[in-house]
Image (cartoon, rainbow, N blue to C red):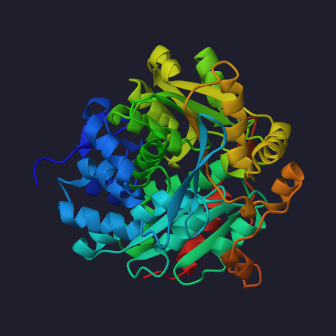
Amino acid sequence: MGEPLLYHSTNNRNGKVNFETALMNGAPKDYGLYTIARPDIPKLAKEQIKEMRTMDYAGVATTVLTPYLRHEIAPKNIEKLVKKAYDSSVISAGMQRISGHSYILWLTGGPTYSFKDYAGRFYGEVLEHFLTLRGERKIIPIATSGDTGPALAHSLRNRPNVDVIIFFPRDSISNEQRRQMTTLYGNVYAFEVNGDFSLCQELVKYLLKNKEFARDAFGNQDIFTSANSISIGRLLPQAIYPFYAYSRMMGDKDEPFVASIPSGNFGDMMGTIIAKEMGLPVERIICALNENRVFADFLATGRYEVRASVMSPSTAMVVRHPSNLARLVDFYGGHMYDEIDPATEKAVREGMIGRMPDMTAMKEDIIAISVRNEEHYKAMREAYLRTGTLLDPHGAVGYWALKEYLSHCPDTLSVIYETAMPGKFPLEVQKGAGIVPITPKDMREQATMAERIYPLEAEPRMTEKGMRLSDAQIVEATDMIRALNLR
């Protein structure tokens, strides 16, 4: 099948592995993330992009993903995997025109009604493909700020060769999102963490790196792998969205477009950067942020400073330090890393810049717009009154950021990524739009089901830059994982 594409660590460009190894490892041993070098990103011809106009989502996905996988998975098996992941009876995407040249890409037609379903379903299929070939099983720790956990839990539930441990921040996700995880039982274990999303990410990274615990508890130092957007198996499918959106917007001309992307952990934005490098005519990417604006400040000043997270109606975007930013910095020739204490394997300082990226090139491709909390509600109200469209709080951030951008260039072809069904956030949507959104049927049923929650009560370590993972939390989490008796 030829030589495979190779993926390197953001901390070591020389140590390269194939897709299967990157997927199975989850993250490199050197505390970086697997990514692909910019010159190695496959290119699609203009004709291939034009042909997407006649394809369904699975067809677009097959065209986008095949260049990455064809050297490790036979093309007929790639098509089979992708068709199963994106079976139109289970998941669909929609495009809605909201003005002359502006659209909404509705990434809400999956089993858990969020954009996380689209990458999560592919991840589940390709992981099962390799685990079956290897005769192996994995434990998958997941950090969620609201939508990742439910999507991956649904994608991985009842698969015989995986167990899923989900860490979610207490009081920081909606009741509806929580119940999408805690009512599944089976091989899905939901851990409620006394902390924020970034602390949940620290827990996942700790488990991925701690080979001694994995060996002692399970007799297999490689039992853990990642399903968060730090996984290459989650990142690559996020390059499909902009291709699909463009296939529904494009006319006879190769007109460039702008994508307004609600951004928390930066997976969608990084996927769109990859799509642009593959040949999609993305003129500009709007990184739509809530009040967690460290990236906006980085673009403006060239200084990256991690700060305590700020609560926001767009809860899934309450991220202190976006993991995928290390990949973005690598793409533009820089190096971002976390300083690790080798004795504890915990991050001492996050977001350190070892080599500056090409900031001029980054700012040509990306503009960051921060949306204040009160503007979430203004956006939901305006979108409903002007277009009759209900947005969730995250889509509202994309809407408001695009509105600000288009005030300078109103005729630009543009798309907003709407990342979650409004019914997942009924209180916030009612507060903004004055309308109670319809709750999807599955979620109405889950509202009355019994929950299984594993509470982690230990206190985090408090610093001036926010919550950090404490030794007590590590002990409590690892003891509770042992007690699950996963075998």
Can see residue 462?
Answer: yes
User: Observer-nearest residue: 433 or 226?
Assistant: 433
Return the x and y of residue 247 as percentages of the image width and height: 42, 45
Return the x and y of residue 407 as percentages of the image width and height: 70, 22
In this view, 395 is above or below 474: above
At a point 35% along the width and 67% down the height, the residue shown is 83
In this view, 150 is above or below 97: below
At a point 73% along the width and 85% down the height, the residue shown is 450
Name of the residue lying farthest toward the left: 2
At a point 65% along the width and 24% down the height, the residue shown is 410
In this view, 301 is above or below 46: above
216 vs 473, left or right, is left
User: Observer-nearest residue: 341 or 7?
Assistant: 7
What quarter of the picture does the N terminus occupy?
bottom left
Return the x and y of residue 132 as percentages of the image width and height: 27, 75
User: Observer-nearest residue: 229 or 400?
Assistant: 400
At a point 30% along the width and 51% down the height, the residue shown is 63
Specify the quadrant of the image occupied by residue 218. bottom left
Return the x and y of residue 217 as percentages of the image width and height: 45, 73
- The total of numbered circles placed on residues is 0
What quarter of the picture does the C terminus occupy?
bottom left
Name of the residue lying farthest toward the front: 252
386 vs 141, left or right, is right
Can see residue 27?
Answer: no
